[in-house]
Image (cartoon, rainbow, N blue to C red):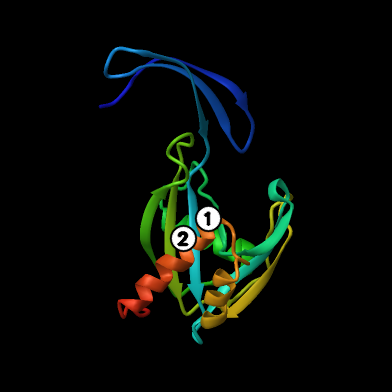
């Protein structure tokens, strides 16, 4: 059921994404003239819990939606990073200054399979402790919000967590914890 790629042209490229304009042949032989695909780096999203089972969250302004909301720490996996768990640890440390004693990948999804090519890797971590100061990128401005788990769930219910990756991370963590999983 895979389409045949007949032609691909990059029409926009910067440090965050590439936009491809593709010409494809469907399995029935018909031609799709202009299929646009956004290529972005893969992502790690980390639901990290402190020894007290507080969730390490961030509060961040997001310019495209002109909103400041609660999120789960996340970031791009650099092309040179082959160990995505190490990339997840790096992102957690850079954004929050926290390091988790244990970290486990719990799910992998696509960002938006209809037009984006990247994978989203969800991690859960336990016994997270602050060991450093934040090392934010130039385009980041955020504050760390260590939140009791029941309060984090309320923030989700109150729609104060709107980022799809963060919503998914909290729900995956909730399911993980409901199965009786605990820190290793």
Callout 1: few (<14), some (14-19), or many (20+) C-alpha neighbours within 10 Å? few
Q: Secondary structure at mark 2?
A: helix
Q: Position of residue 8 (x, y in %)?
A: 47, 17
**For the point 43% across and 59% down, which residue is it?**
122
**For the point 56% across and 76% down, which residue is it?**
154
Q: Which residue is mark 2?
A: 168
Q: Position of residue 166 (x, y in %)?
A: 53, 61
Q: Is residue 114 above or below residue 59?
A: above
Q: Which residue is mark 1?
A: 164
20 and 136: which is toward the camera: 20
- Left or right of residue 151: residue 184: left
- Left or right of residue 1: residue 109: right
- Left or right of residue 86: residue 62: right
Q: Position of residue 68 (x, y in %)?
A: 71, 61
Q: Position of residue 24 (x, y in %)?
A: 39, 17
**For the point 42% across and 54% down, which residue is it?**
121
**Residue contact between numbered discs 1 and 2, judged by CB atoms under 8 Å:** yes
């Amino acid at each position: 059921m895979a389409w045949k790629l007949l032609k691909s042209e990059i029409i926009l490229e910067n440090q965050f994404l590439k936009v491809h304009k593709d010409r494809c042949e469907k399995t029935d032989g018909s031609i799709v003239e202009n299929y646009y695909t956004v290529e972005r780096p893969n992502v790690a999203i980390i639901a990290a819990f402190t020894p007290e089972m507080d969730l390490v969250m961030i509060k961040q302004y997001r310019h495209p939606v002109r909103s400041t909301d609660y999120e789960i720490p996340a970031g791009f996996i650099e092309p040179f990073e082959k160990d995505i768990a190490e990339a997840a640890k790096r992102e957690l440390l850079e954004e929050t200054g926290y390091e988790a004693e244990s970290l486990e990948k719990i799910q992998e999804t696509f960002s938006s399979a209809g037009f984006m090519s990247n994978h989203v890797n969800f991690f859960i971590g336990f016994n997270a402790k602050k060991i450093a100061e934040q090392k934010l990128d130039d385009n980041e401005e955020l504050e760390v919000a260590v939140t009791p788990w029941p309060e984090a769930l309320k923030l989700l219910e109150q729609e104060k967590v709107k980022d799809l990756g963060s919503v998914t991370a909290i729900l995956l963590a909730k399911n993980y914890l409901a199965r009786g999983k605990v820190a290793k």
